[in-house]
Image: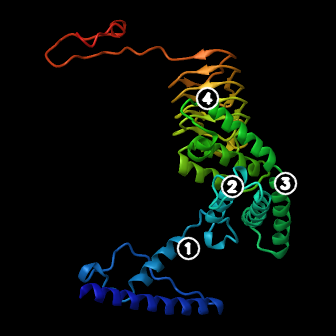
Amino acid sequence: FFSVCGLIERASDMMKLFRSTVAATLAHAGGRRAALAPYSTSPAPLGPRGFSRSPHPIESLVDRLHYTIEEDHKHRPHTDIFSLPNTKRVVDIVTLLRKIMFPGIFEDYHVSNENIRYHLGMLLSEVEELLQDQVTRALLYDCNDESPRAYEHCVAIAKSITEQFVQTLPHLRGLLLLDVDACMRGDPAASSPEEIILCYPGIEAIFTHRMAHELFRLKVPLIPRMMSEYCHLRTAIDIHPGADIGSSFFIDHGTGVVIGETTNIGNNVKLFHGVTLGALSTKDGQAMAGTKRHPTIEDDVTIYAGAVILGGRTVVGKGATIGGSVFITKSVPAGHVVSQLTPELHLKPPSGDQRFLKNNEYSKFDPGI
């Protein structure tokens, strides 16, 4: 009974809110502003099963939320933003690009030699249309101008950017095939290129990064970061779209890898999980924007799990090997190996036995003693 009464009461509240919203909108259109209810942190008294006794509980809550928006003078009002890229559409673009880069693997239907040209043409047309629309939105947001002239200007720039981007797709596909080959060479657990493309989070992260980096290079606002953070959410690999990464790049396992905005990575580089290529902490904050803050990793470098390499002046030379869990803020010469001293291990026997083994004894340990 109370549940039914509650539903009826809430439906009535929604109708009252709708009527009051229409009235407020008409008043605003006539040059008058609807008065806000005084802000109060005191909750309305609750009736049976937790429903408010206030005559207009939802309207009151709307007023209080609206007040926090009106009083926020620090941030740009989202209600005044003319346009923003749509997250779902950006994800759709990533999905279409993945089908273009790896045709026949992610489709819902069979792609054959007979229909592949039609298939690619259809996908390219769709991705161009979606991308141009979202880039237009991003440019309008960035210029913060709602005039027709600004709109026409942003549409023209978005069209040019989209055309430039799709022209890079054959080159980007070539890089991705080299990345897949690097994974096949570097991981004995990989049984086929198809397994790598379908299953490996490292390849998904590299694919998304190569798409996002190209848009970043073309100075598209917001969208490259939206793409990279979507991938971050899916793979736990965080690569800023500004990072410059060479060919035959391999991320093994991948979880916890972080690659900062101004990182430069050469060819044939291999990273394991938990690697951070980051910036030294600074109090300057935004004053450091646009400067080189992250390390440079030259060709043929291997960096093992948990290594942390920081700083814009830090260079890891060609062919170097960085051991697991090291912390580096200075350059490493080419061909060198960096590793930690072996920590001292103590092996404790069951309670009652006072013996224990140290490092030099541990290697001689016989489980039968």
| Residue at the spot of label 3 | 164
> Could one spot residue 278 in this view of the protein?
no
Tell me if 125 is positioned left or right of 38 in this view: right
The residue at 81%/71% (across/down) is: 151
Q: Amino acid at mark 2?
A: Lys
| Residue at the spot of label 1 | 70
Q: Give the image quarter of residue 7.
A: bottom left
Q: Residue 251 or 136: which is nearer the viewer?
A: 251
Which circle's residue, 1 or 4, is located before the other in the chain?
1
Q: Amino acid at mark 1?
A: Glu
Q: Is residue 238 above or below residue 32?
A: above
Secondary element under disc 2, as helix, strand or loop, is: helix
Q: Which mark is residue 99?
A: 2
Which circle's residue, 4 or 2, is located before the other in the chain?
2
Mark 3 touching mark 4, by CB under 8 A? no
Which circle's residue, 3 or 4, is located before the other in the chain?
3
Q: Residue 13 or 8: which is nearer the viewer?
A: 8
Q: Residue 142 or 287: which is nearer the viewer?
A: 142
Q: Amino acid at mark 3?
A: Gln
The residue at 63%/22% (across/down) is: 330
